[in-house]
Image: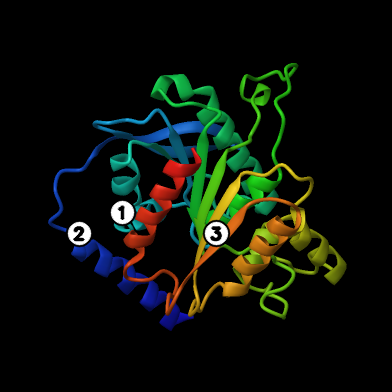
Amino acid sequence: MKRTLVIYALAFAAMACAHAAEEELPYTRQENLVYHETHGFGLIADIFVPKEKANGLGIIDVVSGAWHSDRGKLRDHERAQMYNIFTRHGYVVFGMRPGSVSKFDGSELLTNVQTAIRWVKSHAKDYNVDPERLGMTGASAGGHLALLASVTPLDGNKDAKDDLGKVDTRVKAVSVFFPPTDLTDWDGKKPDYSKTIGQLLFTGGVGARTQEEIDAKAKEISPRLRINGSQFPKYLLFHGDADPMVPLQQSQVFVDAIKAAGGSAELVIKPGGQHPWLTIPEEVEKMAVWFDQQL
């Protein structure tokens, strides 16, 4: 695990060095906007608005790594050139931080992402974007939460007491990097619930929970196992075939399940790609072009 984390850090450091001398940023940035408060904690967003050639569309970036949403995870996305590339394509990017497993379990994180989508839709006019043509992205844990929200959409309730509750959580297209999608089957075996995934299932970890309780909760927050119905956004997933943290199988089974349900999903496999890989901005550019086509 230590070796993997070193690889991860070196990859992002290399990306940062490669772009250290790049030209002026193509966006203006609104930092530390509190988009919701829950359990006394503020949920934070940074919003990136293109300086020119805005296309009237928005992308929600679910900022989470190992199901933690500290500002360092946002910087990882900056180093991967996500905000530069997307805003150059004209998108307003909503970097939404849904909280961390130190305070929220997976079900609560899902609720926080759904709230983020509702907030963006409710404020779409403020940023001149179409609320019915939103894209959503994320990487690793952020990809997991983005997929989970996309397959568990909520309708708006016109009788809701708060304005956000009156808005639905559907998006038009979702593209993510190396997401966990099935927390019951980790490439043919059970995940290690004694570590971070256990914290995702239950705040504080699995503790004395029974295997039945663990299995039920793992199924509840597994995107692959929550696919229901036939109306889905379009999907594009990127995953390396040498990923030491999240098996390639996790993306494969999700794409297969969406297709089996009648939806549209594509998987791009990066040869030798780890978690992440040095040239990931190239895939971010491919993602942006795909959003151009879908939105």
Q: Distance between the residues labelled 1 and 3?
A: 18 Å
Q: Position of residue 283 (x, y in %)?
A: 38, 60
Q: Residue at x 53, y 75 (%)?
A: 245
Q: Do the residues bearing badges 2 and 3 touch, measured as CB atoms within 8 Å? A: no
Residue 141: mark: 3
Residue toward you, 54 or 18: 54
Q: Do the residues bearing badges 2 and 1 touch, measured as CB atoms within 8 Å? A: yes
Q: How far apart are marks 2 and 1 (CA)?
A: 8 Å
Q: Is residue 273 above or below residue 137?
A: below
Q: Position of residue 289 (x, y in %)?
A: 39, 48
Residue type, numbered disc 2 = His
Indicate left or right for 240 with 156 as reference: left
Earlier sequence position, callout 2 versus callout 3: 2
User: How crowded is the residue under tag 1: few (<14 C-alpha within 10 Å), some, or many (20+)?
Assistant: some
Q: Which residue is drawn at 44% across and 77% down?
A: 271
User: How crowded is the residue under tag 3: few (<14 C-alpha within 10 Å), some, or many (20+)?
Assistant: many
Residue 81: mark: 1
Q: Position of residue 222 (x, y in %)?
A: 71, 59
Residue type, numbered disc 1 = Gln
Q: Where is residue 198 in the image (x, y as percent from the top left)?
A: 67, 66
Q: Name the residue under label 2.
A: 19
Number of marks present in the image shown: 3
Earlier sequence position, callout 2 versus callout 1: 2
Residue 12: mark: none
Residue toward you, 280 or 257: 257
